[in-house]
Amino acid sequence: MSHEELERELRQLRSLDAEAGLMDEVMYGRVTHKFARGHARYLQQAAHESVQKLAQARPVPGDSAALTLARTNAEHLEQRFVALMLRVQ
Amino acid sequence: MKKIVQLTLGIMTALGGFVDLGQIVFTMQAGARFGYALLWSILLGAVAIMLYLEMCGRVAAVAQRPVFAVVRTTLGKRLGMATLVGSNLLNLITCAAELGAVAIVLHLLFGVPERLALVAGALLLGALVWLLNFQWIERTFGLSGLAMIVFAVATLSFHPNWGAAAAGLVPHGPGGGKDLLVYAYFAVGIFSAMLMEYEVHFYSSGAIEEGWTAKDLPENSIVAISGIVLGSLLTAALLMLGAIVFLPRAIFPNLLSTTVLPVAVPLGHTAMRIALVGILACVASAAVETALSGGYNVCQFFGLKWHKNLPRKEVPVFTGTWVLMFLIALMLALTGVKPLTLVNFSIVFGMVIMPLTYYPILKAAGDRELMGEHVTGQWQQVLGWVFLGIIVIAALAAFPLMILTHSGQP
């Protein structure tokens, strides 16, 4: 994975993380139960795709630490969305 | 009084049927990335589509020549055939994307499994098109699309900075480098989404379906202009919501479901449901229009009989083509390819082949022999050529920009 691709992946993870925060804001009372469950699943799928992509990635020299961090972030994010899905079951 | 009601209905239908998946996602992403700075591309796209929609309606009403009859005579058999194949491929991809979006919205509204929603939604839409006549198809989908107004209400509830919005109507890029390329990609994408070819295919065929003649030219102008002005305001509201809700939070909306959140934040769950219904109407309408356009294009190009309101036995190629378009699009959507991936591709591909659709319309509308006293005015011709120049530049830039910016991803 090139440095640029890794940076793009990190930005997408930050965006998903911010969206998790927005979901926390609106989840109770501002969206329907069905929407919350459906949207949480789409977010979890997006995080899962990131986890898989990062798991298969080989870092360019100098990016090992950043890739490890990205993998950890992606896994945490996926778990966060799984927890969100469980909360709205 | 009857005329006023008809006109109002026409405008409301044009407004409700104007927005599609590409516009919803692209404009919100543009707002999330660049704030109000790309509002000018909505203005540019609105003027261009208004101009060309009026022209293709005029040619259909006066010369009884729909778009693909004009394409064939202007471009010749070979290039015309290439345009037909390209346009119908584009309609197919767009139809698959919109059907995929229908399934997502049904899943979010009712909790039904997405695959079931996809098959049921496509079959239901197919049945509606099979059973309803043209006017009812147009009105049913167009009027339900009015639920999208909730996005404009949400925008107003945030009390936007109107000064900044006005500044966004003047192009000003973000410095240089990669950001400038992404900015250009979104400008081209919004412009393309507003000028998607199926809109003119459907509008011009609709004019003939409804039996317009030269007497209906004032109605053509009023409907084309007012419907698009209102539809563009709605598109601008989507961009502004992206700027207000997503930009400060550094969210890049990559999911269709995310685009509903800016309504839920200020207005709550009832408004959110209305927003979902509005999106459902828009994407369902676009799926129907693209499938029907497939049938219209083939028949018009080969000079075969077509009309939605004729008995199906009398128009077998037309009926067979739109049904086939629906089925292939459904199969494509069932492969699991994401609607937003398809729509990204269709917007760029649509831009690339756009000059081949718009040039023949411009040429026919300015042809005195064909149009007689109803030929387009000089100013409209000049403006048409200016916009065709912009379309050609955008067409040349579309694919390189998509590759260089990874489809505008942050």
Image (spheres, rainbow, N blue to C red):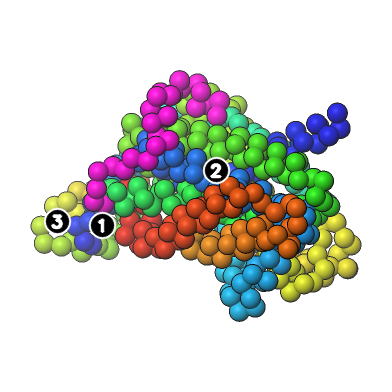
Along the viewing direction, whichever of B65 and B288 lies nearer the viewer: B65
In this picture, residue B270 sits left or right of residue B352: right
Give, as a single range, the part of the protein colored magenta: B152-178
Among numbered discs 1 and 3, the one appearing first in the sequence: 1
Q: CA distance from mark 2 to mark 3?
A: 45 Å
In the image, farthest residue toward the left: A62
Q: Residue at x 42, y 63 (%)?
A: B396
Foreground disc of the pair 2, 1 = 2
B398 or A70: nearer the eye?
Answer: B398
Judge from the rendering whether residue A50 lies leftward or rightward of residue A37; answer left or right: left
Q: Position of residue B339 (x, y in %)?
A: 52, 55
Under circle 2, the secondary element is helix
Does residue B155 belong to the magenta stretch?
yes
Q: Which mark is residue B46?
A: 2
Residue at (75, 53) in percent of width and height? B373
Residue at mark 1: A5
Q: Which residue is mark 3?
A: A63
Image quadrant of residue B219?
top right
Residue B160 vertical position relative to residue B43 in the rendered view, above or below: above
Q: Position of residue B53 (x, y in %)?
A: 64, 50
